[in-house]
Amino acid sequence: MNAPETTQSRPMPHVLNTYGRLPIALAHGRGCWVWDTHGKKYLDGLGGIAVNTLGHAHPKLVPALQDQIGKLIHCSNYYEVPLQEQLATKLCELSGLSGAFFCSTGLEANEGALKIARKYGHDRGIERPEIIVYEGAFHGRSIATLSATANPKVQAGFGPLVEGFVRVPLNDLAAVEHVARTNPNVVAVFLETIQGEGGIHPSRWDYLRSLRALCDRQEWLLMLDEVQCGIGRTGKWFAHQWAGVVPDVMPLAKGLGSGVPIGAIVCGPKAVNVLGPGNHGTTFGGNPLAMRAGVETLRIMEEDGLMANAAHVGGLLSGGLKQALSGVAGVVEVRGAGLMIGIELDRPCGVILQRAADAGLMLSVTADRVIRLVPPLILSADEAAQIVAILAPLVREFLATP
């Protein structure tokens, strides 16, 4: 008889090596703070990459999710899901749009937006519809969203890419007008209101207003990706509301569920009826647990005044960083809106992730040279000051090193 297989002799399962992870495993969190499995405490300046809107273990969210788990987690979109209607109604009320489709991720929301644009074009008799996208854009890692994305490093090894995209520089209206004059197949403009992975680059508000007018003249769809910058992060429900425009299609995800996977495509009158039964679908999207997370997130944000907090504390954080880093050689710019802040340096700065973690602060580096802060919207003024106190010396020390 063979000896029983032991844990030591049995090969251990492995997670695919798709992330350049730090050697930190988190155990629990409370508010804007998290603790690792060794008991070390960190101030969370990353918020799960703009996901943990309400921080960790929020005292209003936790019992609501526990209640829902005790009732129904998942059923199927074969049946009506009343919480979908509730969340869709609220999103339409907040955005001025007409209807919503629910999925599970920002990638799915963006993929669905691309399908809407193509179907919209085909319905108008355009056989090979094309979509204007942007330099610096990031919309996801599926083959279609990867093709709409502008990062060659992300695209490398996955060709051939999907055709049907025309790329232009951000905030360059003349470039879009040139496409309008020369390309009759264009059906939509697709951009992040504030580029996230591309380095926290905002679209100018006057540019968005001009785009809205151009799309109206051309009968194009204006599709604004608010996956990272939406849900109150900039101090309004959606970042484009600072420009006073209303898109035709708005993908959402990340902060909408405060950590529970959720995505949404919110559509205006020109787009809301483009897709019909059989044109699109999802297994997990719109499940009761995710819908309850979305409903409760928006409710708590309203009750606790978190948009005003994002604007106020974000201003303190941005202002504090600008003051602390003023005149420091190598600091290119501190930019962003609300609690979506980027600090661009003149050189790659990926090592700051580990140095910040060692100092008890979680953040990310994107576009190689931009330190990104997207903390929970419950961040306090004192916690913002602590971020500045930890991060500014790290940046100065890093830039002073040859």
Image (spheres, rainbow, N blue to C red):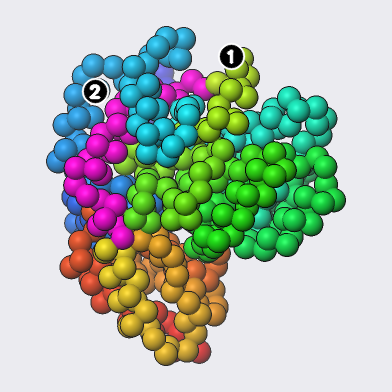
- From the viewer's perspective, is residue 135 above or below residue 267? below
Magenta includes 57?
A: no
Residue 258, percent from left and from top: 31, 41
Q: Is residue 78 shown left or right of residue 360?
A: right
Please tell me which residue lies in front, 97 or 287. 97
Task: Report the amino acid beneath label 1.
Answer: Pro
Residue 277's disc number: 1
Question: How far is mark 1 from mark 2, CA to CA?
Answer: 28 Å
Q: Which mark is residue 68?
A: 2
Regarding residue 216, the answer to whether it shows in the image is: yes
Give the magenta part as a residue range: 282-311
Disc nearer the start of the sequence (1/2):
2
**Which residue does the image show at 47% across and 45% down from the upper left?**
227
Q: Is residue 287 magenta?
A: yes
Instruction: Judge by depth and name the residue closer to the eye, 117 or 39.
Output: 117
Q: Measured from the top left, where is residue 221 in percent x and y?
A: 64, 39
